[in-house]
């Protein structure tokens, strides 16, 4: 077995949390059950990985099989990578009969015709997701197994999820291969990025909870009605307002869990509007400013803003449109912008306040004079 | 009971007799009450049948009205003079709920919203209710889709471009056909994987729309098993049966199996996938 393969397997096993190693090796299926039983999974990971490499040596593992283990690891822990979303377009109206074998063949052929030194692996999952792992080389060097790109594609959809990692120069080639293999005409990157692959899928496939008004005779879900306190001396003064906020919040965000995004970024190219007393700028130039909202779970934070009393309900549509517009990078321009009113009206009662251990709310308002606009 | 001779004037005798008569009367009363209750129940059920018939006729009239091009919230017509307001309200609510349930069961139902209308398309396949999909439409300045929960691989945009502006009924009908066909195909493939996995060799290749299935399955003949390969292409996006079926066996298979392959091919074209497989397990050897 190649030394590089052995080292690669060893490092991959070391990434896996100790309690999960056995299950993952079973999913991999390269080592037999009897072989797995010879490994002591309670020893330190260093030793476990050595044992695994030893057994792989016995079975003469090659890089393709090692790559499968890497795919399995990334499929179970996709949130360790940053995923971007690409959208493909085509003009034809015929029904697509997606043939997996055909797709794989076309993809490999296209990629290999431009660059011979690549390792390409495919793995299909129950939910019609096709995972593609590509290890990139150069015309003169073998593929570097530690510089991999991952692509997740659901057949007959126009969206591709890509975790490109370092080699951005290979992106055009990758995009080309995807377009050819899936029978589309072109592809563009969307303004949507997150660590949570499933949340990105929820957003573009519209699987997140949207509140549709229907008469469907479902049993009404129990609303979280706080029990009326037994002490009649306690009166809720703001009950109506609280109920209004709850209702508005539900209409906007729905009842279910929100997709998980880590940030939303707004580049403002708008004129700074102030009264003449606060004459900040002599020249009426656009006030170039970028506002970035960060949070471990941005949409849940936004959802809890109004009920927590930190913002007025309804929230600015610039914030609430994120799942529907499927973007978390925005450019706001004067008058020609997406929304009437050329600047955001977000009224925060208490700026820069962080609450809870789960959510930290950082509003980074920094004046930036951009030297280049790349990508958007 | 017989009057006991010689005990006519003893207190025991009279009371015993009275008791017995009382018991008899009680029995008779109970029996009569039971029959009266039966009759009452029967009368109530007959009245209920009448009520339901009336309701049905009312709904029929409304459906006719609706078919003459009236979309919108149906009013509830209550022409039963009830004495209490509460009873009227309860009756109205019950009526509306029943009407809405009926509309929901037809597969397409809608609710007027502030800016338009929200439709719900409920799908089903051969008696099993499956997923529901929603469309939030705006009606001003023109009919457009505001939000929806239709899966991305259903050609919603194409269908909307063709029919949404001109014929909303056709739009809903075509979309409903696409969705029902999709869930039907998916249901068949899921059933196959769930109940007949022992007959399938290797992976079942499918796709998001479930309109191309390729897999191998085992056919036994003379106590030997042979793998068949089948490729099912569902050419009609609104159909849940395949339009193209190719069943092939390995070159070393006995010639008789070619007939079996042809028979299977024909069966797959006519019958739902999981039902076809059920019939294979039913018959012993083919």
Image: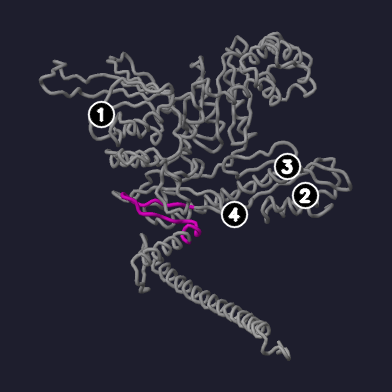
Alpha carbons under labels 2 and 3: distance apart: 20 Å
Q: Are marks 2 and 1 on the same chain?
A: no
Q: Which residue is mark 3?
A: B197
Alpha carbons under labels 2 and 1: distance apart: 71 Å
Q: Are marks 4 and 1 on the same chain?
A: no
Q: Residue at x 52, y 23 (%)?
A: A79
| SS class, disc 2 | helix
- Sequence-wise first label, 2 or 4: 4
Task: Where is residue B227? Give x, y as percent.
Answer: 79, 41
Q: Is residue B121 visible?
A: yes
Q: Which residue is mark 4?
A: B128
For discs 2 and 4, the disc positioned in front in the rendered view: 4
Task: Identify the subunit bearing mark 2.
Answer: B
Magenta span covers which residues?
Answer: B102-121
Say few, some or many: other residues with alpha carbon within 10 Å of mark 4 (under 14 / 14 to 19 / 20 or more).
few
- Sequence-wise first label, 2 or 3: 3
Q: Is residue B123 left or right of residue A281?
A: right
In this view, the residue farthest toward the right is B222
Alpha carbons under labels 4 and 1: distance apart: 50 Å
Q: Are marks 2 and 1 in contact (CB under 8 Å)?
A: no
Task: Identify the subunit bearing mark 4.
Answer: B
Q: Are marks 2 and 4 on the same chain?
A: yes
**The C terminus of chain A: image quadrant:** top left
- Sequence-wise first label, 3 or 4: 4
Q: Is residue B194 left or right of residue A262?
A: right
Q: Which residue is mark 2?
A: B261
Task: Where is residue B186? Give x, y as percent.
Answer: 60, 46
Task: Where is residue A197? Give x, y as percent.
Answer: 51, 28
């Amino acid at each position: 077995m190649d030394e590089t393969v052995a080292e690669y397997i060893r490092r991959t096993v070391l990434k896996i949390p100790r309690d999960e190693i056995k299950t993952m090796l079973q999913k991999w299926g390269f080592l037999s059950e009897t072989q797995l039983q010879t490994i002591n999974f309670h020893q330190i990971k260093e030793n476990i990985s050595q044992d695994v490499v030893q057994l792989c040596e016995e079975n003469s593992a090659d890089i393709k099989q090692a790559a499968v283990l890497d795919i399995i690891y990334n499929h179970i822990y996709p949130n360790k990578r940053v995923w971007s979303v690409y959208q493909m377009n085509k003009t034809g109206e015929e029904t697509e009969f997606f043939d997996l074998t055909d797709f794989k063949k076309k993809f490999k052929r296209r990629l290999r015709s431009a660059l011979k030194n690549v390792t390409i692996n495919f793995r299909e999952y129950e939910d019609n997701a096709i995972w593609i792992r590509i290890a990139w080389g150069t015309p003169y060097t073998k593929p570097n197994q530690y510089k991999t790109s991952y692509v997740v594609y659901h057949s007959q959809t126009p969206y591709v999820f890509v975790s490109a990692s370092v080699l951005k120069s290979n992106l055009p080639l990758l995009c080309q291969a995807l377009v050819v293999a899936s029978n589309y005409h072109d592809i563009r990157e969307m303004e949507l990025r997150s660590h949570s692959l499933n949340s990105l899928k929820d957003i573009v496939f519209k699987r997140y909870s949207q509140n549709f008004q229907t008469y469907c005779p479902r049993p009404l879900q129990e609303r979280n009605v706080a029990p009326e306190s037994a002490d009649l001396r306690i009166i809720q003064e703001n009950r109506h307002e609280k109920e209004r906020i709850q209702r508005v919040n539900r209409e906007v965000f729905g009842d279910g869990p929100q997709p998980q995004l880590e940030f939303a970024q707004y580049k403002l190219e708008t004129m700074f509007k102030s009264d003449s007393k606060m004459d900040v700028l002599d020249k009426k130039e656009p006030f170039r400013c970028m506002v970035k909202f960060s949070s471990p779970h941005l949409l849940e934070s936004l959802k809890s803003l109004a009920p927590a009393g930190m913002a007025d309900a309804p929230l600015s549509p610039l914030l609430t449109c994120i799942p529907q517009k499927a973007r978390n990078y925005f450019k706001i321009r004067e008058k020609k912008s997406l929304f009437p009113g050329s600047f955001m009206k977000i009224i925060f009662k208490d700026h820069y306040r962080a609450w809870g251990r789960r959510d930290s709310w950082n509003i980074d308002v920094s004046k930036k004079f951009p030297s280049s606009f790349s990508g958007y | 009971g017989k009057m006991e001779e010689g005990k006519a004037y003893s207190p025991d005798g009279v009371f015993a007799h009275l008791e017995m008569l009382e018991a008899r009367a009680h029995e008779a009363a109970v029996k009569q009450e039971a029959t009266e209750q039966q009759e009452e129940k029967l009368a109530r059920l007959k009245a209920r049948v009448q009520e339901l018939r009336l309701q049905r006729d009312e709904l029929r009239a409304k459906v006719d009205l609706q078919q003459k091009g009236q979309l919108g919230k149906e009013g509830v017509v209550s022409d039963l003079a009830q004495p209490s307001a509460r009873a009227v309200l309860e009756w109205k609510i019950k009526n509306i709920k029943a009407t809405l349930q009926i509309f929901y069961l037809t597969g397409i139902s809608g609710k007027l919203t502030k800016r338009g209308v929200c439709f719900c398309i409920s799908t089903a396949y051969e008696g099993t209710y499956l997923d529901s999909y929603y469309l939030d439409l705006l009606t001003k300045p023109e009919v457009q889709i505001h939000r929806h929960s239709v899966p991305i691989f259903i050609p919603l945009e194409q269908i909307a471009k063709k029919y949404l502006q001109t014929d909303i009924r056709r739009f809903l009908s075509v979309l409903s056909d696409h969705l029902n066909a999709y869930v039907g195909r998916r249901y068949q493939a899921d059933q196959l994987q769930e109940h007949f996995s022992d007959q399938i060799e290797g992976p079942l290749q499918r796709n998001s729309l479930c309109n191309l299935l390729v897999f191998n399955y085992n056919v036994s003949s003379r106590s030997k098993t042979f793998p068949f390969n089948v490729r099912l292409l569902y050419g009609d996006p609104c159909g849940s049966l395949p339009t193209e079926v190719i069943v092939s066996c390995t070159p070393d298979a006995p010639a008789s199996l070619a007939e079996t392959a042809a028979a299977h091919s024909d069966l797959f074209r006519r019958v739902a996938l999981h039902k076809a497989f059920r019939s294979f397990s039913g018959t012993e050897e083919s």
